[in-house]
Image (cartoon, rainbow, N blue to C red):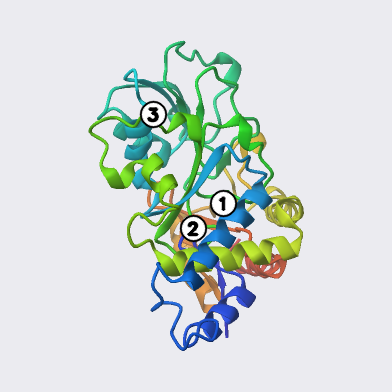
Amino acid sequence: MRVYNFSAGPSTLPEEVLKEAQRDFLDFGGTGMSVTEISHRDKAFEAVADEGSALLRELMGIPDDYAVLFVQGGASTQFAAVPLNLMHSGKADYIVTGNFAKKAWQEGKLYGDAACVASSEDRAYTYIPAMDAVRFREDADYVHICSNNTIFGTRYVEFPHTKAPLVADMSSEILSREVDVTRFGVIYAGAQKNLAPAGVTIVIARRDLIQAPLPVCPTMLRWKVQDENKSLYNTPPCFSIYMATLVLRWLKKLGGVKEIAKINEYKAGLLYDFIDNSPFYTNRVEKKYRSVMNVPFVTPSPELDAAFVKEAKQNGLVSLKGHRLVGGMRASIYNAMPVEGVRALIEFMKKFERENA
């Protein structure tokens, strides 16, 4: 029996995608080889990678003057790749709204004058700073944000208007809502939350910005090189790219980003409405900035939190333990989490409250 997996990543994937991958695991497209065995130079794999890139462009409305890259590793590698490709004058502005945004800023400081121009750390990252109060530097090479906070459960309602190119880590919300890609110079996202198994990161970059990486930038982190080689400069994470392509097909069949955004808002609304009307559970995030993807909550005590996680697992609701920096519980309800999974969680929450209030 499949459980409902609320992990923040690697996370749940659509069941029909898993079944298709299961068929291809022994014989991919009649090749007599597993999809995990096929060469990245094989035309069959190149077709998969090309389809994935085309689907991502279609679903996100990515213009032709943007590169779409499938690169190795997680999004944290891009914390270094961003300054190494973009910090030409040695200055960049960062808005710190959570743990990963802070790590990106700290990494940026290794390569130049990376300034934290706004932060929500003063209130435990439970809000997004007002953008009209942020003083961006006129000569910054870029402004970096993390659009959705996986750990603390916040997201940007509106993105900042900046003179410098806007760079966004969208790891925990890519393809969950419509965004105007042209508002950004670079978007990057680890795939293991909303798109594929761990191992591949998506980079969407305006080509005019990536033509002159810093001389010290390693070849593998040069987005220009990856673009020129169609993400095949060396052996890419083939299986993760294949899985991403299957998920993109699934999303297109579902109706695309516009349709999944409606479903995501509905799922999150069900869960937040229940929490807000319960005297037993609490979500500490300012309502305006609540994430639609990651919903942290607590019971009246750490002991009850631990009991909740244990009993939830026994009821087929897994990976609900909150991040160590926050505690409590966290339900990550990404694109592939069905409405039925959220309803099952709410029913368990009701039962646990009746038995422990």
Answer with left or right where residue 51 lies relative to residue 95.
Answer: right
Measured along the vertical axis of the image, is residue 160 above or below residue 269? above
Distance of label 2 from label 1 (alpha carbons): 7 Å
In the image, what residue occupies the spot 76% across and 59% down? 255
Label 3 Cα neighbours within 10 Å, binned few <14 / some 14-19 / many ≥20: many
Q: Which residue is mark 1?
A: 294
Measured along the vertical axis of the image, is residue 262 above or below residue 40? above
Measured along the vertical axis of the image, is residue 137 above or below residue 345? above
Residue 1, quarter of picture:
bottom right
Residue 71 shows in the view: yes
Distance of label 2 from label 3 (alpha carbons): 29 Å
Secondary structure under tag 3 reads helix
Secondary structure under tag 2 reads loop
Q: Which mark is residue 8?
A: 2
Q: Which mark is residue 86?
A: 3
Label 2 Cα neighbours within 10 Å, binned few <14 / some 14-19 / many ≥20: many
Instruction: Work out which quarter of the rendered image holds the C terminus and state it.
Output: bottom right
Answer with left or right where residue 257 lies relative to residue 165.
Answer: right
Answer with left or right where residue 270 lies relative to residue 145.
Answer: right
Mark 3 against mark 1, which lies toward the viewer? 3
Mark 2 against mark 3, which lies toward the viewer? 3
Most extreme residue toward the top is 138
